[in-house]
Amino acid sequence: MDWSKPETEDVRAALRTFAPQLAEKPIAFLAEGWELWAFEAGDHVVRFPKNEASVTSLRLERALLPALAEHLTVRVPRIDVWGDSGPNDAPFAGHTKVPGVHVWPNGDAPVGKPGPRFGRQLGDLLQELHSFPVGRALDLGVPVHDVAVERAKRIEHFEAVIRRVFPLISCEGRTHIEAVYRDAINDTAYYASEPCFTHRDIDVNTLIDDEGNISGLIDFGGCVVGSPAIDYWLAVHGFERLGIGEQSAACIEASGVTSEELDTMRPELAYINLHYPVHDILHGLETGQLDFVEDGIRHLNTLLPSSIKC
């Protein structure tokens, strides 16, 4: 069960104790994610966990980000505000806002247009991310998503889809989701990629500047040691939707992935491509943001094969 969302005065009171230099700055609600609420406080982003599990993600970022800042050429947040007891008597964290806007729609956040070099830049970033030493990641507390963990999470997710999404969609949609999800749960081809350090939410957390070049990468609370396929979804399926489908090959080349490795990922990528709109529907239901529900259903309908039968 989620905790209550902090009010502005709750945020200000927490800052008075742990970051008094920000306490009297303008404070505004910024965004709500699956795990965190984010507020702007002056030039900082201050994030508050929504539940006990979210505290784990926040602590992981605190441990991991200094090491990633040394490993990546792209800017990442540097946590310089930490409170052990904020709203809901839970820890919270803050960092100077990373410049740029999202390349992929993320709630009401501003969205930019990727430039002609974006694909290659993203490929370079993927190569750097996936080369972060696995042993170092594990030492810093990054969890492992092996086959057993990934399969269990897919089963749990599918159960939520049956309960909450199936009543809202067409019979054809239910039929297609069930077929794809059962394969993704049971077929070994969906678990065949070599594990490495992965971000897992790179599409909505890559920032670009006014010229469409990558300016930063944020939100590492969901990173794991596991299959890299999810980090390639943007290049393989998302670039077309961004209007830069011609940059996909350059991105994949710069990432260093071989054609054989990419082929191994394709079954999992097909599942992820269907998972995303379903995930949006669940997120909208969870947060009461009905635009996510409506957009997710519309996107899901575009993915249904014309041959699908109820």
Image (spheres, rainbow, N blue to C red):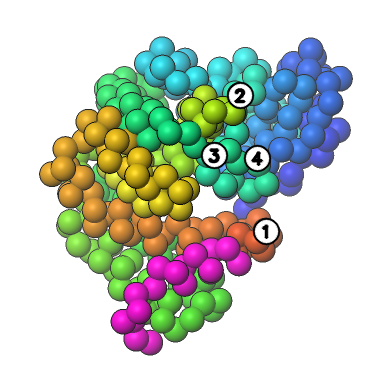
* Residue 143 visible from this viewpoint: no
- Marks 2 and 4 sit apart, C-alpha to C-alpha, by 12 Å
Mark 2 and mark 1 lie on one chain; the one further toward the N terminus is 2
Residue at 80% x, 14% y is 20
- Please say if the residues under marks 4 and 3 sit with CB atoms less than 8 Å apart: no
Kindly state the secondary structure of the residue where label 2 is placed.
loop
Q: Position of residue 295 (x, y in %)?
A: 58, 63
Residue at 83% x, 21% y is 25
176 in relation to 137, above or below: below
Quarter location, residue 31: top right
Q: Which residues are magenta?
A: 294-310
The residue under label 2 is 99
Q: Nearer the viewer, residue 14 or 231?
A: 231
Query: Residue 310 bears which disc, if any?
Result: none
Residue at 37% x, 16% y is 71
Q: Nearer the viewer, residue 95 or 157?
A: 95
Tell me which amino acid carries mark 4: Pro
- Please say if the residues under marks 2 and 4 sit with CB atoms less than 8 Å apart: no
Tell me which amino acid carries mark 3: Lys
- Please say if the residues under marks 2 and 1 sit with CB atoms less than 8 Å apart: no
Q: In the rendered structure, does residue 295 fall within the stretch colored magenta?
A: yes
Residue at 49% x, 37% y is 114
42 in relation to 264, above or below: above
Tell me which amino acid carries mark 1: Gln
The residue under label 1 is 289
The residue under label 3 is 113
Mark 1 and mark 3 lie on one chain; the one further toward the N terminus is 3
Tell me which amino acid carries mark 2: Pro
**Mark 1, mark 3: which one is toward the viewer?**
3
Kindly state the secondary structure of the residue where label 4 is placed.
loop
Query: Residue 110 bears which disc, if any?
Result: 4
